[in-house]
Image (cartoon, rainbow, N blue to C red):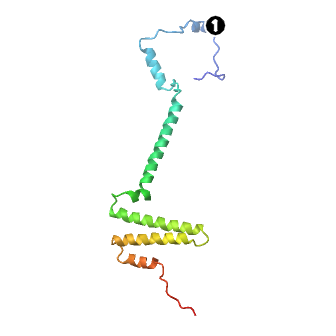
């Protein structure tokens, strides 16, 4: 039942009004009745707990802790799988070493392509660096006997051409 202006209360005559006025407005509650009634009203949702003044600052602090913790964990996981971290590890399996070799080679090719895209002319320093890196890789592969003759061919191809004597007339 709602108490608004649309409620039409019946008009009582004088005797009925007098009987209503004689009804008691308060009753003595039995022991525990107030607690049971309050519990029932609270269970039905009539009483709401007053929010703590620390609720929003605590929620913000918890969110900040989760954010910083997530960043730290993500950074650690990201660095653990990086090329630099894998190069420094000594506990890699053979398959991981092959993957590392592939990733390092791809990174080298990508860096060389990026450099080539950034410059309009041939830089002799870059050419020398590239040839030294490739020659060093070929020698490393040859030392570990992984190449089946490929390193010798690579080293020969990367050596500066021997100067042939020319006869000028």
Q: Position of residue 137 (x, y in %)?
A: 41, 70
Q: Which quarter of the figure has residue 146?
A: bottom left
Determine whether the residue tagged by mark 1 lies in a helix, strand or loop.
Answer: helix
Q: Nearer the viewer, residue 146 or 103?
A: 146
Q: Where is 160 relative to 44, above or below? A: below
Q: Quadrant of residue 86?
A: bottom left
Going 44% across and 53% down the picture, which residue do you hit? Answer: 79
Q: Residue at x 47, y 19 (%)?
A: 38
**Going by the image, does 138 lie left or right of 10?**
left
| Quadrant in which the N terminus is drawn | top right
Q: Position of residue 14 (x, y in %)?
A: 64, 7
> Height in image: 54 above or below 109?
above
Picture quarter containing residue 3? top right
Rendered residue at 57%/7% (across/down) = 19
Camera-nearest residue between 87 and 2: 87
Viewer-nearest residue: 108 or 72: 108
Q: Position of 93 compared to 85: left or right?
A: left
Furthest-bottom residue in this view: 169
Of 127 and 34, nearer the camera is 127
Q: What residue is drawn where x is 55% and y is 67%?
A: 115
Q: Residue furthest right?
A: 5
- 165 shown above or below 1: below
Q: How far across and down, in percent of the image, does residue 63 sit?
A: 50, 38
Count of numbered marks: 1
Q: Residues within 10 Å of mark 1 (few under 14, many from 20)?
A: few
Q: Position of residue 108 (x, y in %)?
A: 48, 66
Q: Is residue 164 above or below residue 73?
A: below
**Residue, disc 1:** 14
Q: Quadrant of the C terminus?
A: bottom right
């Amino acid at each position: 039942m709602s108490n608004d202006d649309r409620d039409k209360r019946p008009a009582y005559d004088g005797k009925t009004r007098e009987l209503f006025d004689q009804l008691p407005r308060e009753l003595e509650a039995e022991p525990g009745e107030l607690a049971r009634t309050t519990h029932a009203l609270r269970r039905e949702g009539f009483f709401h707990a007053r929010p703590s003044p620390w609720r929003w600052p605590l929620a913000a602090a918890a969110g900040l802790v989760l954010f910083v913790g997530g960043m730290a964990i993500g950074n650690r996981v990201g660095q653990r799988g990086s090329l630099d971290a894998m190069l420094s590890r000594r506990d890699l399996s053979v398959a991981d070493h092959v993957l590392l070799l592939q990733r390092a080679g791809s990174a080298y090719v990508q860096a060389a392509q990026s450099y080539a895209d950034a410059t309009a002319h041939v830089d002799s320093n870059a050419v020398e660096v590239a040839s030294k890196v490739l020659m060093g890789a070929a020698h490393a592969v040859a030392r570990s006997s992984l190449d089946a003759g490929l390193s010798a061919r690579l080293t020969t191809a990367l050596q500066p051409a021997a100067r042939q004597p020319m006869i000028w007339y």
